[in-house]
Image: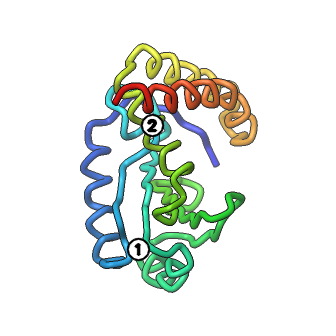
Amino acid sequence: MNITVVEHNPNWKEEYLKEEREIKEILQDELVNCFHIGSTSVPGLKAKPIIDILLVVHDINELDNYSMQFEKLGYEVMGEFGICGRRYFRKGGSNRTHHIHSFQYDNVQEIERHLSFRDYLCHHPEIAKDYGELKSELAKKYPNDIERYGDGKDDFVKNVEKQALIWHWTAR
């Protein structure tokens, strides 16, 4: 996978909304809510041009019954893919365009982690800018090594994630 980090594209929101409509048609009553997450959801943040989607569903095991419908939309069904209680889907092959991270409604830790991180970056543009610069540097340094790219972001993300969760609970 070639790693490219680009300037924020305001069309990412529309791309998310298009995908959300198609997902809602498939899941209907199984879907609790759908969220645009990840770097493409944060205005002004540099990102890999991949739309990250968070699905909150009633029963995570029921999601397995929708594999064929997701495949028809072009998704690769990946199962838990390293995170217990998640269902992960990706679209676009080696030129990835979308990731779906799905959790059952009561997996509050994973759901809050994603939403708090997004919201924190939206409310702290200076931290989002630093994150974007880090990602750009790592993409230049490791253009074909997703493992090293991810490892290079790990400490920053974990630190911001901690700040974001604390901010989430104190900002109410």
Residue 121: mark in rendering: none
Q: Specify whether 153 is left or right of 115.
A: right
Pointer 1 residue: 73
Q: CA distance from mark 1 to mark 2?
A: 28 Å
Q: Residue at x 32, y 62 (%)?
A: 19
Give me the residue at 35% from left, 66% from top. 32
Residue nearest the viewer, comparing 102 with 148: 102
Residue 168 at x, y percent in the picture:
43, 32
* Mark 1 or 2, closer to the camera: 2
In the rendered view, does 119 fall on the left or right side of 110? Answer: left
Q: Which quadrant holds the C terminus?
A: top left
Q: Please indicate whether residue 102 sits to the left or right of residue 84 in the image.
A: left
Please give the count of numbered marks on the rendered protein. 2
Amino acid on which the number 2 mark rests in the picture: Ser
- Disc sitting over residue 116 in the figure: 2
Mark 1 secondary-structure assignment: loop
